[in-house]
Image: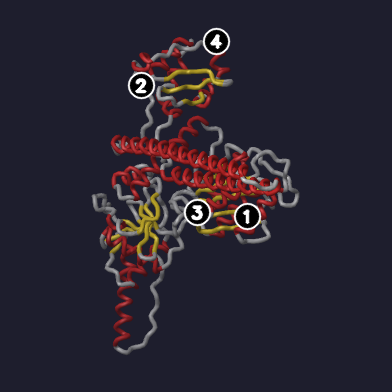
Amino acid sequence: MIAKIIPIKSVRKSNYSALIKYLTDPQDKSERISQIKTSNCYSDDVTVALLEIQNTQEMNKRAKSDKTCHLVLSFPEGERLPLSDLNAIEERFCNVLGFTGHQRFSVVHDDTNNLHIHIAINKIHPQNLTIHNPYYDYIKVAKLCEQIEQEYGLTQVNHETVSDKASRVAHEIETRTGVESLLGWIKREVLTEIIDEDNWQDLHKVLARHGLTIKERGNGFVLVANNGVAVKASSVDRSLSKGNLTQRLGAFIPGEHSAKSSQQSTKQYKPKPLQNRIDTSKLYARYQQKQADSARQRTNQWVMLRQSRDQLIDRAKQEAKLKRNLIKSIKAGRLAKKALYATAHQQFKVTIAVIKSDYQKAYQHSKANHSRMGWLDWLAFEAKRGNAEALAVLRSRRVDQFKGNQVSAKQRQDGPNANSHFKDGLVESISKIGTVTYKAGSTTIRDDGKRLIVLPDTSREALRDILQVAMKKYGSHLVINGTEPFRLQVAEVAVQNQMRITFDDKRLEQYRQQLLKQRRVSKTQSVGGIRSTTTTPRRSL
């Protein structure tokens, strides 16, 4: 499992209410939220508990740092624990970080292949009103992760905390975006040559061959690519920090960078998808064109909105000026004119407020409609619209090591009609590794292209619907993998609903045949008027 505290870049942007709103939003998904739990609050109601936590944070006026700790616990793909175990694990993490007695929300999300828990902890103690910031939290969290993996038999993950930070950061960026980062590209393509140079002139030549320049910025150096993307030099490798470079090469000597040297560079960094099996060049070019068009439309629309706002404000000012002139020209007492002036000014203020409010609403609407989408987000958006190529690219990113309950076939169906079974259904979401969540009747189906994923608490009625979808997709000969109770239940549901299904596993098929034979005997005895008690075959393979 992986445990990570999500840092916030600016304390000003920390908003506990907004975080809880995001965590508890079902996002039109039927199975996104498995549990919402409050701890150390007087009420279990979400709204009341949220107000209580916000009031507690407001009572501490001295703390300048973020008052919220956002901890995420993510479990390996396909590995799901009961809610009682998840609650116990959540309690242990909060205790080891020193948040015993602190108020918190815990939300279990089950809308991806990786079950994960979001824990929003109030750092302000409800009685002492003091803030707690855990020290060396990454060490404590890593040790507890190892213990929990051993206790619950989870897949063991490397929790080494002294690994290369630059490689870890580059891997996280590229995994999240699906696009090669400048940091990762420099480490793979240029770093070895940079480290070997012993003077500034040769270093500038190496960088120029790769379309890079090194510049002073603040108290350090940055490496800038030809397309303007920059990365902190010390984040690529500690040997490239300003102190280490000046100690090795002497005082900094700026390089002579020109357009000619940029054109002569043998290698240049260009953002491109991280794909090995599928050619995404055309799809990525289309993505870039779409983003450029969206940015241009957004800019043009914002210009029009600002012009419209300014025109309305100018018109309101002219009307207000005309009203003041009319009031000035009428014959009335001083107090009467003063009251008329006040009324006209109040009307002007209301008009300006309405204009600005309408502008903000239109601006936010335009921003939402023309927001910039990441590469993976765009692929998921296109896949949801029926783009099979985009879905194939997403699915090519996954590492096939799913261990949970699943229904599949021995022969994979990867042809053009492989996904036709959910095109007519209501697709709720598509993950960044191509897992499609859609509705089949009242049952939610999860399909990653190679299998139908079945959650541990799936009812018999839902399992029947899943098997029917599996028959349409794979045919009547199915492969059932997962826990033994699950596999036995699949056989029982198939016989109970008289499904013409056979199983690839011989022992499971024998169990199905045994159930089927017993059902026929029971039916024959019932028709013949013979009353007898029959025993269910022993549930063991």
In this view, the residue farthest toward the right is: 128
Mark 2 to mark 3 CA distance (whole Å): 43 Å
| Label annotation for residue 267 | 2
Mark 4 or 1: the one toward you: 1
Between 130 and 57, the one nearer to me in the picture: 57
Q: Nearer the viewer, mark 1 or mark 3?
A: 1
> Which amino acid, by three-letter code, is at mark 2?
Lys
Mark with earlier residue (4, 1): 1
Spot occupied by residue 538 in the image (x, y as percentages of width and height)? 40, 71
Asked if residue 334 can be seen in this view, the reply is yes
Say what amino acid the circle numbered 4 marks: Gly
Residue nearest the viewer, comparing 138 with 231: 231
Q: Are marks 2 and 4 in contact (CB under 8 Å)?
A: no
Residue beneath disc 3: 109
Q: Which residue is mark 1?
A: 50
Q: CA distance from mark 4 to mark 1?
A: 57 Å
